[in-house]
Image (cartoon, rainbow, N blue to C red):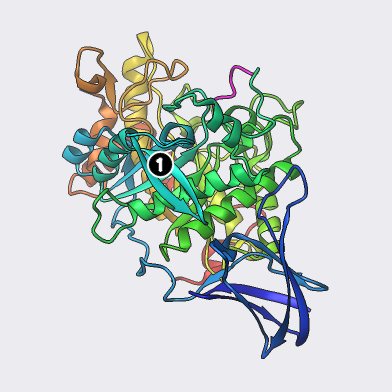
Amino acid sequence: MYITKIEALRDEIHLYTDGSGPVTVTEYAATEGGAPARELSRTVCEASGGIIRLPRFRGQEDRIYSRLSVEGASGACFVTDFAPDLAEVGGSYPQPDIIKTLGAPPKLAARLGIPQGRYDVSLPGIMSTVPTEDTLAYVHNGKTYYFLQSALAGLDAHMKSAPVNTLILLNAPRTFGSTGEKALLDTVIHPRFDWDYPDAFISAFNTETEEGLGYYCAFVEFLVERYTRPDGKYGRAAGAIISNEVNSQYVWGNAGEMSAEDYMREYTRAMRMAWICARKHCSWFRVYISLDHFWTGVNFSASQPLRYYPGRKLLELLGTYAREEGDFDWGVAHHPYPESLSFPDFWNDRVPRFSLDTQKITFKNMEVLEAFLSQPEYLYRGQLRRVIFSEQGFNSRSGDLQQLTEKQAAAGYVLAYMKARNMQCVDMFTHHACVDNPHEFGLNLGIFRYDPTAPEGVGEPKPIFDSLMAMDTPKEAEAVAGARAFIGEELFDYLLNPPPVTGAKSPRDVLGNE
């Protein structure tokens, strides 16, 4: 017997199968890693007409979140489909006409009029284990969780500053506004988080315990409900990136030393549960894996395979693990920084190649990611996975090289933006950051210089500001001409229309010209 899909309806769960007759369905908690998942129920029922029907609710608990196993069967184990009338919010993904994105302070974002934004939100910064005058109660799967209203007020302001936003969901115990509440951190921080490693800025989400997974799912579901309301009362979110640059997990999604396979089993479960929590309420909400620019290479040290992984390997594992238990609609949030984050002239990068086995994917060879996702095994129901370039930028150096590197950054933005716009699967091209950050590892990635005396540190605009504002406006042609002359016409045109990626068919070969 094979389970082809599992559909959630308002009152039932339907498991579609190629068999018939009596079956035993065992329901497990959705935990992954650590101790074996707890058995929640065991039901003897009938496969009739290709469908096994289960009540959706077990008391106050919802089987939509559970892992379902049919004795003697393989295939889907989690909900893969939702009845058309299930989600409160329907329709289609609210894709803006242009892919331009900038994470800017609310007042500045509104003034610049950029249609997309993205914002970091960390679980330990907005949740608590105890009710207070500052908390808002929220019921998830029969249990009550508490959100800090003071923290939500700041988040609401950011979410209202752009028509569409993507959330970056983090689990940071010591930064990103963490309250430091011990009871909360003991529950939600990954059980093997390396507290002694000073550069472990963010923890992986805890999928290993039912309590930790419950907080994580409540975190996702609360945000989706709040920020997909049709009236837009609190602002609008369209998707969520799960953690940050997980191929460099020891820094940006720490779960202690762990093989790539074990790490991705847990991370795939976290992505799947976020997708289920989101699609339960909003039919078009998207979830994304976050990757840095290392592809077949690794960040920091290849001699630490339990801490740093190749991005390509993680996508291969995500595809495999998702298919094993029922494929779901995951996307990719990629960060195609230049080969060296210190230098903005990516057209001079030496390591990136137009090949599926390239060491890095930078602005120079962004098209490699689309070629990889165009392979049949990575399509989702015949369509390309969606890609957002959610964090990347162009550093300008200080001192004698400041003027040159600022010009390089301005020209580089134009070419990189055009390359991303030419791809079939890209919905967002973010510039990181809005203002030079004096605490960002010595980098100056803003479109504004930092001025400590100015409101929110926003100083004078850099040349890249004009490039960013020009794209997809009547001023674009002038910006393109300037960038093309600066980089060199032949090189500019070559990178804008690069050669086919070695080892892959083009997206148009796979999907046609639509």
At x 21% / y 12%, what residue is drawn? 453
| Magenta span dominant secondary structure | loop
At x 72% / y 85%, what residue is drawn? 46
| In this picture, residue 376 sits left or right of residue 508 | right
| Quadrant of the image containing the C terminus | bottom left
Asked if residue 268 lies in the magenta stretch, the reply is no
Provide residue 11's location: percent of width, then percent of height.
51, 75
Residue behind mark 1? 416
Provide residue 181's location: percent of width, then percent of height.
49, 26
Provide residue 414's location: percent of width, then percent of height.
33, 40
Quarter of the image where one finds residue 191: top right
| In this picture, residue 215 sits left or right of residue 417 | right
On screen, residue 487 above or below 449 = below
| Near-viewer residue (462 or 348) | 462
Q: Which residues are magenta?
A: 197-201
Residue type indicated by callout 1: Ala
| Quadrant of the image containing the N terminus | bottom right
Provide residue 364's location: percent of width, then percent of height.
50, 40
In this rendering, does residue 289 appear at all?
Answer: no
On screen, residue 428 above or below 41 = above
| Near-viewer residue (56 or 260) | 56
The single residue placed furthest to the top in the displayed view is 399
Quarter of the image where one finds residue 382: bottom right
The single residue placed furthest to the bottom in the displayed view is 49
Quarter of the image where one finds residue 136: top left
